[in-house]
Amino acid sequence: SAVISQKPSRDICQRGTSLTIQCQVDSQVTMMFWYRQQPGQSLTLIATANQGSEATYESGFVIDKFPISRPNLTFSTLTVSNMSPEDSSIYLCSVGTQTGNTEAFFGQGTRLTVV
Amino acid sequence: GESVGLHLPTLSVQEGDNSIINCAYSNSASDYFIWYKQESGKGPQFIIDIRSNMDKRQGQRVTVLLNKTVKHLSLQIAATQPGDSAVYFCAEGFSGGYNKLIFGAGTRLAVHP
């Protein structure tokens, strides 16, 4: 298993500003992902955080809005840029530990409110 | 703040009853499926998974059924307890996708004493 810590756990931000969310894992992991969970809804994959290269974004998400870093195998950041109230969501970090293991582990999430 | 699952369909059951949560998926190329439980203020927690070459898998108090013909997945919880109250999501995964998941809509389970 993997223990995932996200910071901050919650924040209230002014529109037009940016927030960087950190994801720290207690062991080296192959894959790291970022998801968004809008209020009362399911999880949507934003991107795969690739170590040493640019993140791979899903349809509807772009690097300028959600820049991602992954400097090593245990850490990643997601920035929500130029925020608007529509960005109010829970942002979740997820990790996969090895090929053939289906279980993906999740952090507790960052609850973002944009005012 | 708004809780997880506020706008999701709700299944209400009495404590001790069996619960059945359903999920429809769209991608026939999915290699495995996972059920997650999400409590308010927490991230999703793995419950059970099933490979696409299976049609049933049992865990402790839970059973997952997979019907690939109609692209339907269900989670059965036996003797439902108040601690089972949460939002439940099904998710599809793909071999080679390295734990990248596509989540279904979710169902809120409310267990009443």
Image (spheres, grey):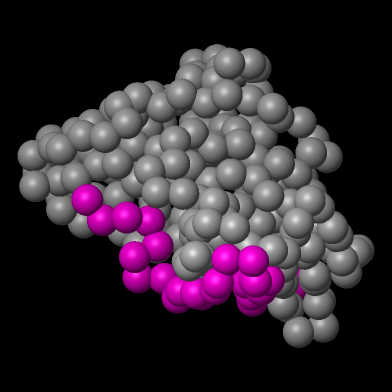
- Which residue occupies 72% across, 77% down? B72
Between A43 and B30, which is closer to the camera in this rendering? A43
- Which residue occupies 52% across, 26% down? A4
Query: B11 above or below B16?
Result: below
Residue B21 shown in magenta: yes
Q: Pick the quarter of the image with the N terminus of chain A.
A: top right
User: Residue B7 placed where, x, y %?
Assistant: 35, 70
User: Residue B64 placed where, x, y %?
Assistant: 77, 64
Between B57 and B66, which is closer to the camera in this rendering? B57
Between A71 and B14, which is closer to the camera in this rendering? B14
User: Residue B103 placed where, x, y %?
Assistant: 56, 60
In this orientation, does residue A63 appear?
A: no
The answer to which quarter of the image holds residue B71 is: bottom right
Q: Residue furthest front?
A: B113
Residue B57 shown in magenta: no
Tell me: A104 left or right of A92.
Answer: right
The answer to which quarter of the image holds residue A104 is: top right
User: Residue B35 placed where, x, y %?
Assistant: 66, 57
Between B56 and A30, which is closer to the camera in this rendering? B56
- Which residue occupies 80% across, 70% down? B65
Tell me: B86 left or right of B102.
Answer: left
Q: Residue furthest bottom?
A: B70
In this orientation, does residue B59 appear?
A: yes
**Residue range highlighted in magenta:** B1-30
Q: State the predominant SS element of the stretch in magenta.
A: loop
